[in-house]
Image: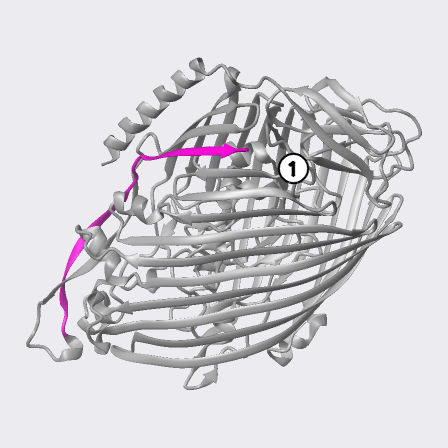
Amino acid sequence: MIPRKIHLLTFATLLLSLLGSGVRAQSNSYSVNGRVIDRLSRQPVPYAAVVLAGQERTGVSTDSLGRFHLEHVKPGIWRLTVSSIGYKTQTTSEYRVSAATPFIEVELEEDATQVEAVTVRPTPFRVTTESPVSLKVIGMQEIEKSPGSNRDISRIVRSYPGVSFSPVGYRNDLIVRGGGPSENKFYMDGIEIPNINHFATQGATGGPVSIVNADLVREISFYTGAFPADRAGAMSSVLDFQLRDGNPEKQTFKATLGASEVGVSGSGHIGEKTTYLFSLRQSYLQLLFKMLGLPFLPNYIDGQVKVKSRLTEHDELTVLALAGIDNMKLNVDEEGENAQYLLSYLPRIQQETFTVGASWRHYAGRHVQTVTLSHNYLNNRNLKYRNNDSSSEENLNLRLRSVEQKSTLRAENRTYLGRWTVREGAEVTWSAYTNRTLQRLYVHREQVLSDYNTHLGILGWGAFVSAEYVSLDKRLKASAGLRTDGCDYSGRMARFWEQLSPRASISYALSDAWSVSGAAGLYYQLPPYTALGFKQEGELVNRSLDYMHVGTVSGGFDWRHGDRLIVTLEGFYKRYGKVPVSLVDHIPLSCKGADYGTVGNEALASSAQGRAYGVEAMARWQIPGRLNVVGSVTLYRSEYRNDTSAPWIASAWDNRFVVNLSGTYDFPRNWSFGAKLSAVGGAPYTPYDLATSSLVSAWDAQGRPYYNYDLYNAERLDAFAQLDVRLDKIFYFKRFMLGFYIDLQNVTVSKYRSPDVWMSTGEIRDPEAPADQQHYVMKKIEQVSGTLLPTLGVTIEF
């Protein structure tokens, strides 16, 4: 099946070549329209210089209304650089110049120290005063053309330092600086999104494919430390993606046929003051998985909407919505030992999730106030019968229905005082969690049918204040902030003064090329609702849990060669405390969450500790309109212990090293080629307990082998490397754009060997023994994965 697919893709490549040489109706240039305004007053900035980044000879000035019209721009992905006397020079996000070029609005910030014209020195390598380290800004070029990522938000950031990945594939778990997938937070235009993946693992943040349509994303800010004070609950990373604004001048649409879905998106306006964005996608991932011979067949639908309205000259209202509907069936007809093993324990998963939010922003001179109201919802259902036989309820192993909801009201004010910027804010949250679970467990050498029903309501609150300072010569930048959070789950968690979260950062430019930066902070996270709401015998058994916390220190330097090249070196140290640890298997919750289903629904105690430390190096080279290369190396350790008297043990994420090298090159005639080489160290693993796994009562309870937790992470897998390549061809016509791409993941067909697993044959080897002492005859199944995964995509924008 796979070779035939490759032949089809080869034919498609030849077809694209013929099209590239035979089509003569393509457009050579387009115009770019927009306006430049003052960031605070919202008034137009007249006579500002607008140039094409990397092509400084191509530029114009704004008119008296701040509008500009840049003609004869070569099609492709570009940035603009805008400068004006009395303002800081601004380099925009990346935009695609085509028949559907958006209207570009640029906001300039006053610079009281600038009194004369300056030489324009654009740079795409941006950082903030609050996060001078551990922040990476990712633009459209990488979002659109990142090899192997399939335009998936979570996969795109894997090219950057500190981010590990699972070689097994089919998962989007973010493993950042030795932290687990439950330690990440996601925001869309400032509104929290609990999980950005379909078929989400409840209690963590991973899944197989993103809900977010990259067509709507303008830029990604990825924090691996030095988290902003207004972003609560993160311990490993914050992924903050900003959506594009709708087009105020025309209606544009884009249709995409990708690796796993077909989608349509649009951008336009309603009247003169309101713009909109939307997308709708339907997957055919189940066809791809069936072709690969996988025993689970996921299907999903998702949609996004953004509406932005200028209520007055100083007031804006933005409304956002994101929704996903998931249904994963089991492919019980799939044959083979590996398929039968997965079918023995995988449940059927159905989920519905959505987030809606509205944000009102008021510009009052040097003060900007923002009020945000949002609500998110997750309805998760898992169903599993022994041997997938639903003919009798006696075969029921799992029936779970769990609903999480959270409403948030947040208000903040930002004040610009020359070299100082001060921000303060507060928020109130209401969370509701319900869970009705019937689950067959193996406890104390016998099967137990657990039945619990939970309804939990939690009132939470938080507040923060921060200040940023920039010296007169702009060489010194510093910030300090304080945040606190609390909730009424328990008296311990209500004491918000025990969750004080200070943070500080500093950056100093030693020269035009060299700078040194550092940051430190203490960050808190509420345990997952699955843990807070877990019941045994009708009682909440985890009332004694505390907020988890991590203290982090990071520092390093960067060297920049103009606007083309940046090299960074950064070290980090993280120390975890109050991490929930299982009272059954004695494994911390932070070491779980990289599989389907739920985590946290068990008896826990806040006694575990953890630490992660390492060094990261990155080089990033960009030539606008031609080349983009990113290379990174991370060397680190990730460890934990159950209490202060226990020895340190390698955590589940202790891969020791991660290496990534990726790049894209734009050839003439709108061809581009990209490649990504990824390598990751072998992860630790725990051997199986064959004696327990072979027990009939134990196997029938969960349909998979049991680990020997006395040897937790005592073994280690081999390292793994993978090469992905991508070829793009775009045709720019006068009224529309047509694009094709071929993405080949794992072109070297590298094999990854996971620990061999044991599976029941269904034959009882000692039928004469008492029922609770009978054993199945077991067989070993070799776990080797790794195949070439080809993808052909088509887009049309008009």
Quadrant in which the C terminus is drawn: top right
The color scheme shown is one colour
Q: Is residue 88 magenta?
A: no
Q: Position of residue 156 (x, y in %)?
A: 51, 40
Say which amino acid is labelled 1. Lys
Q: Position of residue 293 (x, y in %)?
A: 24, 46
In front: 493, or 640?
Answer: 493
The answer to whether residue 162 is visible is no
Name the side, left or right, on which 332 lies relative to 579.
left
Residue furthest to the bottom in view is 538
Q: Main secondary structure of the magenta part?
A: strand
Name the side, left or right, on which 682 lies relative to 658.
left
Taking the spot 34% from the left edge, 60% from the top edge, the residue there is 711
Q: Which residues are magenta?
A: 774-798
Q: Is residue 784 magenta?
A: yes
Determine which residue is flagged by label 1: 250
Name the side, left or right, on which 719 lies relative to 689.
right
Taking the spot 57% from the left edge, 60% from the top edge, the residue there is 355
The answer to whether residue 478 is visible is yes
Q: For numbered disc 1, what is the local secondary structure?
A: loop
Residue furthest to the left in view is 768
Q: Position of residue 75 (x, y in %)?
A: 59, 23
Taking the spot 41% from the left edge, 53% from the top edge, the residue there is 300
Residue furthest to the right in view is 115
- Disc 1 crowd, CA 10 A, few/some/many (<14, 14-19, 20+): some
Quadrant of the image occupied by residue 523: bottom right
Quadrant of the image occupied by residue 1: top left
Quadrant of the image occupied by residue 122: top right
Give above or below for 206 relative to 277.
below
